[in-house]
Image (cartoon, rainbow, N blue to C red):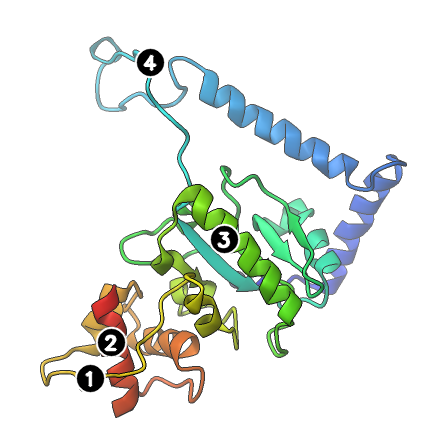
Amino acid sequence: MIKKYSYKKLSLLAFSAALTFTSCSTNKYAATNKIYKEQAKEFGETLATVPPPKQMIDSMPVNEQTFIGSVNFGIRKPNFVILHHTAQDSTAQTIKTFLIKKTETSAHYIVGRDGKVVQMVNDYLRANHAGAAKWGNDTDLNSSSLGIELDNNGNEPYSDVQISSLITLLSTLKTKYNIPSANFIGHSDIAPKRKQDPNNFPWKKLAEQGYGLWYDAVLQIPPPEFSPAVALRVIGYDVSNLNAAIIAFKRHFIQTNINPALSASEMMILFNLYKKY
Ligand SMILES: [Zn+2]
């Protein structure tokens, strides 16, 4: 879900952005693509500098530290995929938001209602989509994940063509970066106190294809000592606010009666999932 900005503020910003665009007649995104390229180039230069800038150990004298470049290394890869709904009315609107500096928000991909995919940040770069979030002990999900925005206002069904496109995209990403099935999760899972997206999302359908986990058809009654808080924590939820964690769990896996109470059958689902993580 994309943070809301006042319409007045956004239109002002969009107006100034539009002024920049008009100076480039052929591609209306030429100006922002130029900014993207310059920023990416700066990161490239930082990576190529020897010794790496700003990586000295502060508390140690300079003559006691050396940098010698190894010949064996690679580039870090994303290990999670975080799904969002845009809470906006069109892909164009979301693109506009992601091109305005002031919003400080972005995602790697937007999947439109029509199934068309727009990539806005290189997979190897960090997009600003997760915000303050936690999953397991990972507190910097922006650094470890790819963010995918589904063009959806949050109160409407996702079209078949949109989900089918999403699955094609996920298949590519899963293979390319070797992302575990369990690591395809939603924004509400990693930020239960703040976020509700993606809402009414077909998680079961995705899990059947290997993107996210789902519970079995046959369930067992958990033992008396079973603790929902421990189970939610093992799955990955931030349980510092247990009610918020239960609500996020139910939004993902139950999708009805989204409240902080767990019925006997919901406890069975939680117990089943806890054993899978
Ligand atoms: Zn979101």
**Where is 165 relative to 251, above or below?**
above
Give the CA distance from mark 1 to mark 4: 54 Å
**CB of mark 1 within 8 Å of CB of mark 2?**
yes
Of pointers 2 and 3, the one earlier in the residue sequence: 3
Q: Which residue is mark 2?
A: 272
**CB of mark 1 within 8 Å of CB of mark 3?**
no
* Amino acid at dot 3: Ser
Task: Please give the label number shown on residue 69.
Answer: 4
* Badge 2 density bin: few <14, some 14–19, many ≥20, Cα 10 Å: many
SS at mark 2 in the image: helix
**Where is 130 relative to 260, above or below?**
above
Of pointers 2 and 4, the one earlier in the residue sequence: 4
Give the CA distance from mark 2 to mark 3: 26 Å
**Where is 175 relative to 113, above or below?**
above
Tell me the quarter of the image containing the C terminus: bottom left
Residue 247 is situated, as x and y percent measured from the top left of the image, at: 38, 78
**CB of mark 2 within 8 Å of CB of mark 4?**
no
Viewer-nearest of discs 2 and 4: 2
Q: Which residue is mark 1?
A: 220
